[in-house]
Image (cartoon, grey):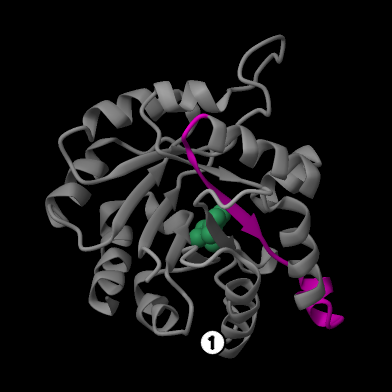
Amino acid sequence: MPQKIAAGNWKMNAPDLGEVDALARQHPDPGVTLLLCPPATLLAALSERLSDMKIQTGGQDCHTASSGAHTGDVSAAMLKAAGASHVILGHSERRADHGESDALVRQKAEAALEASLTPILCLGETLEQRDSGQTLDVIETQLAGSLPKTDAPLIIAYEPVWAIGTGRTPTPGQIEEVHALLRDRSPADTPLLYGGSVKGSNAAEIFAIANVDGALVGGASLTAEAFSPIVSALEASV
Ligand code: PEP
């Protein structure tokens, strides 16, 4: 059985770290893997704050190299040293803002694995691609291009670009179709997360879909009030 995971992506936001204490109080012994991915500047402080709690931390990106002349970048080894266990890679905002290709994402995933971090590989189609019937082809191409050539454990997140931060979500059937493809094409037991406007009100329905093993959550991961019901819905689905 793949692990069940509720992962929060804080993006370039710095919520009050007291929110994390509230979340930990509400889920002192979560029946699922709980993970928060803050901006790199907060990673060490958050990891330290969570060291006695059952919430893990992750980065939002890493460089392909372990060190060197790469101004502004952070290596996987540095994330690991700051307490991270995971790193989000290939998020559509990085693909759009920084022109990241599937090949680069694969190299980053290999660097993450080398540093003993678990990559969370993000894939997803644009609205234009969905509307023109290309979704499965796009997902298959992204997966083939960005999945590292190793059996090392990783996590895949299906995040339709048009569902991120928009309040729109695909139908359960649309999510199920993509997750069936991902299950078929990825190593056995790979946790498959759905991401894109997950909230307390739609989480249970999403977690009931075949081959959905959890969620990657943006906006709703910034407060305990919004994230806790999602975690509870995932716990209830186990
Ligand atoms: C994300 O950016 O990974 C995401 C899923 O964002 P949101 O939950 O805000 O749609």
- Provide residue 43's location: percent of width, then percent of height: 40, 29
The residue sitting at 30% across, 30% down in the picture is: 47
Q: Nearer the viewer, residue 107 or 101?
A: 107
Q: Which residue carries the number 1 mark?
A: 172
Q: Residues within 10 Å of mark 1 (few under 14, many from 20)?
A: some
The residue sitting at 40% across, 78% down in the picture is: 207
- Provide residue 184's location: percent of width, then percent of height: 62, 76
Q: Nearer the viewer, residue 57 or 41?
A: 57
Is residue 101 something one can see in this rendering?
Answer: no
Judge left or right: residue 202 versus residue 98.
left
The residue sitting at 68% across, 29% down in the picture is: 64
Q: Quadrant of the N terminus?
A: bottom left
In the displayed structure, would residue 232 be above or below residue 116?
A: below
Q: Amino acid at mark 1?
A: Pro
Q: Nearer the viewer, residue 27 or 187?
A: 187
Q: Does the magenta portion include 80?
A: no
Q: Which residues are magenta?
A: 115-135
The residue sitting at 47% across, 59% down in the picture is: 216
Q: Does the magenta portion include 117?
A: yes
Pick out the residue farthest to the bottom: 173
